[in-house]
Image (cartoon, coloured by chain):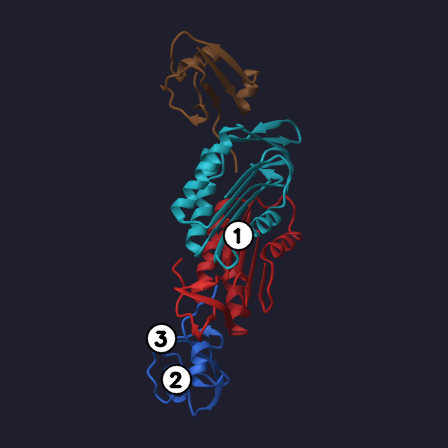
Chain colours: A red, B cyan, C brown, D blue
Amino acid sequence: MKIEIRTQDYDPWHEISSYQQQMSPGSYGATAVFVGTMRDFNEGEDVEAMLLEHYPGMTEKQLETLGQQAITQHELLDLLILHRVGEVRPNDPIVLVAAWSAHRKASFDASREVMEKLKSVATFWKKEQLGEGARWVEKNTPG
Amino acid sequence: MKIEIRTQDYDPWHEISSYQQQMSPGSYGATAVFVGTMRDFNEGEDVEAMLLEHYPGMTEKQLETLGQQAITQHELLDLLILHRVGEVRPNDPIVLVAAWSAHRKASFDASREVMEKLKSVATFWKKEQLGEGARWVEKNTPG
Amino acid sequence: MHITVKYFASLREQMGREGDILDIEEPIQMTDVWQRVSNNKPLENLLCSRNRQYAQWDELTEDGDEIAFFPPVTGG
Amino acid sequence: MHITVKYFASLREQMGREGDILDIEEPIQMTDVWQRVSNNKPLENLLCSRNRQYAQWDELTEDGDEIAFFPPVTGG
């Protein structure tokens, strides 16, 4: 399992590909991935940039805990979670969750569950920079 | 939408990354992906290779139909489906489904639904090459 | 009228051929097509298609049809 | 006893500071911590944590605790 909070832009597909190298070839039959990307439009307004804040120390621990729970509960072979913080631009990936398992049900269930838990409990906050002014995002889109 | 049946090995992460280039940056907020990979072990036996057969003409049409249905039903921004045929080796990707949408629910629902439909209706058949002899796979793992 | 019949996967191996071309007098059901090509073998665990769409076993063939018989699918 | 208090996101901006260090006589509840640092502002739409785990509002602080107040999370 690898869990990281990133301050710089990353390429999610390259991250998965590279992380997968250390896994045993032929051991996994299923990989389910979710990537959340910054859109340039939200709630009716153009968004130029976003500031992503977190609670250093607490957020990492939360992700570790929910990652470990997902591995145990779904018997995952591996799990990768990346989350961006700092100033994010439209089209930048924000969150990446990738789950590896023997069969598809486990990876599908796990990737979605990790995303829902991450969005509902992990201490991240988004502030959108609009053309004029800025606004804190007040709630997440329903899952 | 892009749908292809491939006779050669492919890198799923590279395919997604490259396909994504033609999409409008900042338009999608969610990408859900499933990759099915050949394992070197199935139903208690080591598998050395697999032959993947399809019904040329029928299979492509089925994938087009179920892909179009998923786009319409879930209001996807885009969809990519690749499926391998011919001789496949352990660790080779077999199927790739990637769904892009504005918010996460649609891409999660669509990628899973496309996979379940693909596995239950699309005319592909697997024959496993074991150490001694070969066997046709008789049914899929439940989703 | 002529119809083309195709076999896939384990059925193709059991039949020992990829397909047949049949010359029939009048429209017959898919089950009848199967009886003819298989010498009256029982219909066990097979699916059929007509012109590249899944078909019902009582569906009638028409001239020029492409019929296929195959075991349950196992892709993905 | 000393406790550290942190603020995040929109609350940090409203408070005009990243945190406070409080010197208290005896264990008090999280709600009391909030009253002290906010000058009795109502508790609206806020969450709290104690030593980096979500906490209940009636939980008692201990010496050396790291308390945090913040709005609902919006990550992912």
Q: Position of residue A79 (x, y in %)?
A: 56, 56
Mark number displayed over residue D34: 2
Number of the front mark, 3 or 2: 3
Q: Is residue D58 above or below residue A118?
A: below
Residue displayed at 60% across by 58% down: A11
| Disc 2 element | helix
Q: Is residue C20 positioned above or below B112 on the image? A: above
Q: Residues within 10 Å of mark 2 (few under 14, many from 20)?
A: many
Which residue is nearer to you in this view: A92 or B139?
A: A92
Which residue is tagged 1?
B23
Q: Mark 1 belongs to which amino acid?
A: Met
Q: So how many labels did they put on this image?
A: 3
Give the class, few, some or many, for how many residues have Cα within 10 Å of label 3's Cα (few <14, many ≥20): few
Q: CA distance from mark 2 to mark 1?
A: 48 Å
Q: Chain of mark 3?
A: D
Chain letter of the residue beneath label 2 in the structure image: D
